[in-house]
Image (cartoon, coloured by chain):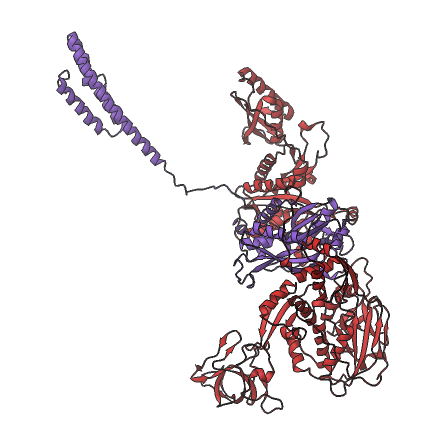
Amino acid sequence: MLVPLSWLRDFAPFEGDPKFLAETLDDLGLVVEGVKHVGEGLEDVVVARVLEINAIAGADKIRQVMVDAGGEPLSVVCGAWNFAVDDLVALAPVGAVLPGDFAIAMRKMKGVTSNGMLCSGRELELTEDHDGILVLGKAGESGAPVPGERLVDALGIVPDVVFDIAVEANRPDAWCMAGVARDLAARLRLPFTIAVPPEPAHNESATEAVSIAVVDDDLCPRFTARVLTGIEVTASPDWVARRLTLAGMRPINNVVDASNYVMLELGQPTHPYDLDQVAGHGLRIRAARPGETVTTLDGMERRMGERAIVPSDDRRDCVICDGNDVAIGIGGVMGGESSEISATTTRVLLEAAYFTPMAIARTTKRLGIRSEASARFERGCDPEGIDRAALRLCQILSLTAGPQFRVDPETIDVRGPVPKATNVRVRTARVNAMLGSDLDDGAVTGYLERIEFRCQVAGPGQIDVTVPTFRPDTSREIDVIEEVARHHSYSALPRRRPAAPQVGHLTPYQKERRLVRSVVAGLGAHEAWTPALLAPGDHGRAGMGDDGVKVANPLTPDESVLRRSILPGMVKALAFNAARRQDDMRLFEIGHVFPPPDEERIKRAFARTGETVIDEREMLAVAFAGPGDDARTAAGAWMALAEAIGVDDVDFIQSSGGDSGDSVPGGLHPSRAARLVMGGSDQKQGEAWAGRGTMIGVVGEVDPGVLAAFGVDAERQRVGWLEVDLDFLLNTAHRRQEVVTAVSRFPSSDVDLAFVVDDAITAADVAKTLRHAGGELLEAVTPFDVYRGSGLPVGTRSLAFRLRFCALDHTLTDAEVGELRRLCIEAVEQAHHAQLRA
Amino acid sequence: MSGATGDDSNDAVLVAEATARVAGTASLDDLSALESELLGKKSTLAVAQRSLAALSLEAKREAGQRLQAVRKQIEAIVAERRAMLEEVARAERLAADRLDLTEVRGVPWRGHLHLVQRTRDELEDVFVGMGFAVAEGPEVETDWYNFEALNMPPAHPARGMWDTLYLDLGEPETVVLRTHTSPVQIRLMQAKFPPIYAVMPGRCYRRDTPDARHIPTFNQIEGLVIDRGISFADMAGTIEAFTTAYFGPDIHSRLRPSYFPFTEPSAEFEVTCTICGGDGCRTCSHTGWIELGGCGMVDPAVLAAVGLDDEMWSGFAFGFGIDRCAQMRHEIPDMRVLLENDVRLLRQI
């Protein structure tokens, strides 16, 4: 809201540095977002009459203008073309300093002397216009200024300061000049008064019987109507037009301007109808019938009551109808085109009403329409400020409406359930408990009475407060306490720090999640932040089926689907980088994914007992796209990660390929992917526990087809992939015991064994068999070679392991090692139909 | 080399000659050859020593001792020379092994944590140091958690402060992508009886057109304290303590009245401009202050929504943008880059 200081001064004698006033407003919560000085720097500008306009040889953009500025004719060079001889214009003579410290000096252009500058509206900061210079009128016209007269005198310009104030949604009272002045005067302890408008000149009796019927007074609890006659529609007085302009509104005509002026000054919207265009000489205020239409002032046809904004929405939009019950306006939102004030209007039906804030809020949302009036009504106007506003409008209109202007003596006032002033018991002890302050009853009542909250001390520390009707935000003790805090000043309140009764901490999950991030970053992956909202079809392109949960009102279609996996977003990030010639990288992300919920779950979420709508899973995803990276890189990274957090019982379940395609994780290379499954190992046999068989993630390689679908060159680069459910990983998966085992002081013995094994049997299985067979004496199994090719049957490969044996209490004898070797060979040969390779 | 069996002067000549020749050797091989020539079985010295057998016992002893002394001297000279040549050879070998340590290939990759996540970690750590726990909640919420329990019934005008993304779940406009982290306050108060001292970081979503300072997906951190006797002064002190701890001892906070439906009294909190240190600059519009977030005393209506007695319990809440803190600290000119994942940016910090 743009607030001219001069307007505020109508209510209280504000003095002093505008910067100080702005800081005071800030501290009251009326945040000043800008301060503009207007009409300054114009002291030297004079009115000049154009005497002649001459072309300048060799110049086609500028001309010489001879002007009379009250002395000898002056030569000025000018580049504008929007004026003629005898026009009155604004001249900044040599030596003048214009707004923005723009000093005017004598110049010579193409040999012609320029003794100043003819100014545009924008150069003078009077208007936004910069298409030509400011033309003030023609010399000799009645009321035209005289050449040589100071521009500020000619236009009645007084330097002013305009504050741009952001008013919070809960302060409708402050959304007007009077309201800002009230708060500021209270803080500065200045007397504040709103002048009572005089009674207007009345007709002797009503000129026209007008009937007002409020059918639905829950939507419109108070409606007043006055009939204004003998109106000449013309321009507003200059000071009205200037104030409207400074406040950011365009002057239109004296009737509309008076309505806008009153709204800006007092916060009460009013609506003038051209009475002769209202059929049936009356108004009916009622809820619209669904589908009923109104053509509003802006020329748009609006359909009422059609869209429900919440399930329980009654879809009741308040419409104003003429006497024939035809809707001609949307109550409190926008008037209709049919009864708009025009140049020929002579009689006005003036509406000043109070509409129910929530009803207006719903209507503006349903219809997607907003106006200065609706914004005020939906926040809550003062139901008792209506008459003052109507009288003020009549007062301002009377200045220009002509000698015949009269107001009918009868005011129609239909009152329904109008909100009443609220009474609140305020306890001084409670004030101090909430604020940490040390205020006494006198201080509390002092702050409140200065903003027109009536106070009566009912007993020590007990104050009965009557909240004025213009403060709908204040209805409870805590609301009053806020007012005390505001006027005492937040910065004057003490500061202390509460002692938390607990030791600050992260949960074990949160700590380990940080560890996971460090480990993965240590493996060379950069942490990314990919969008949780994907484009339709992204899941399909990533081989993951349907889209899942959709956004009902996306900003763009590209961000309209909630991800079920991090994979599509991550591959997009790889593609984004590849397009910028950044190819080799590893990326990871920890973020939520959103599996579509079933109906039952949604119902439970609405029970408000803590259930979430979607079983959101926090996932770790890592893409390995460095030189030479592939599924093995991902598998190795998984092993390093599992080792770092001590998870020791997760198996790789790899699809056997071929027809059993169903077990291939979506989006991954069918023969280079495995599911990570908890607790399937023989070591856990017989143990019944919840996690057994739960899939906690996938590891492998992104399907080259998926890479290609997102624009990543699958020929150039394989992309290893690891995606793990962090909840399962950190909260459920089996952990090795954090107990140290003694290491042997005796020398160890190594045995190298190579087996020819069928391709279907995993190296992990063979290693597991070896570990089992080697028992306690087997210190380590290290795979060291894989060989395929000549000398081996097709469909097999040789897997070589180094076994290191060691006993805690003695050096193993050759015989012992030989026996262990034999046991291991036998176990592998039997379990896997493998053959020891000679 | 005549007169090997001669007298002292002969010996001196012999030693001098050997010294000169040893000094003339350039390699260990030369030295070894010379050594056997001077001291080996066929050397003049050895021949002379062997020839002593013919002398009288006394003469034999006297000459033997003399020649043995000569042999010792020459051996010492050779040993010294050998040590010297070995040192030279070792130095040459190592010199040949010289490496340019900047000639590095295959530097191990080190990944970088995302700067927003790092900022979140740092903020969490500051609050943990102040005795807070860290709580988290879902990103998809019902309207009740996101709005209604926070004192915003349906169609409440204040809902316009958040441009909301709704999901196609349940009845229309009842399931939202959370517009702030405040619903976690409600979940926390439902799950745990006071006292509560917690911060709640997480991703939020708004239907905002992205620009240099706003992105539709962003990270917020929320704080909530509920205890007996908590006042506005506790809030102001907590925010000040956080501000100096996170931004540094010269950065302070101030509060000014504002409006949020879920707090009363409500405040904006601003911190000293980190660019100009409060002197006033373009970044802070010459005010010396930068707006960071909102805060306030938890509204009794919110306490009522979770069944807490507002006469017994009071508290405060605050919230601000993690991305905004990252933007301030790392001077990120345009927030939109945070969502692009350009690796050239990710690996900078």
Vertical placement of residue A741 versus B231, above or below: above
Residue A779 picture quarter: top right
Residue B260 picture quarter: bottom right
Residue B35 on image: x %, y %:
24, 22
Name the residue nearer the viewer: B341 or A36. A36
Residue A536 on image: x %, y %:
68, 53
Residue A609 on image: x %, y %:
77, 46
Number of marks in the rendered image = 0
Q: Colour of chain B?
A: purple
Name the residue nearer the viewer: A541 or A470. A470
Q: Name the residue at the bottom extreme.
A: A140
Which quadrant of the figure contains the N terminus of chain A? bottom right
Q: Colour of chain A?
A: red
Name the residue nearer the viewer: A125 or A742. A125
Residue B96 on image: x %, y %:
34, 36
Q: Name the residue at the front extreme.
A: A460
Vertical placement of residue A657 versus B64, above or below: below
Vertical placement of residue B238 versus A256, above or below: above
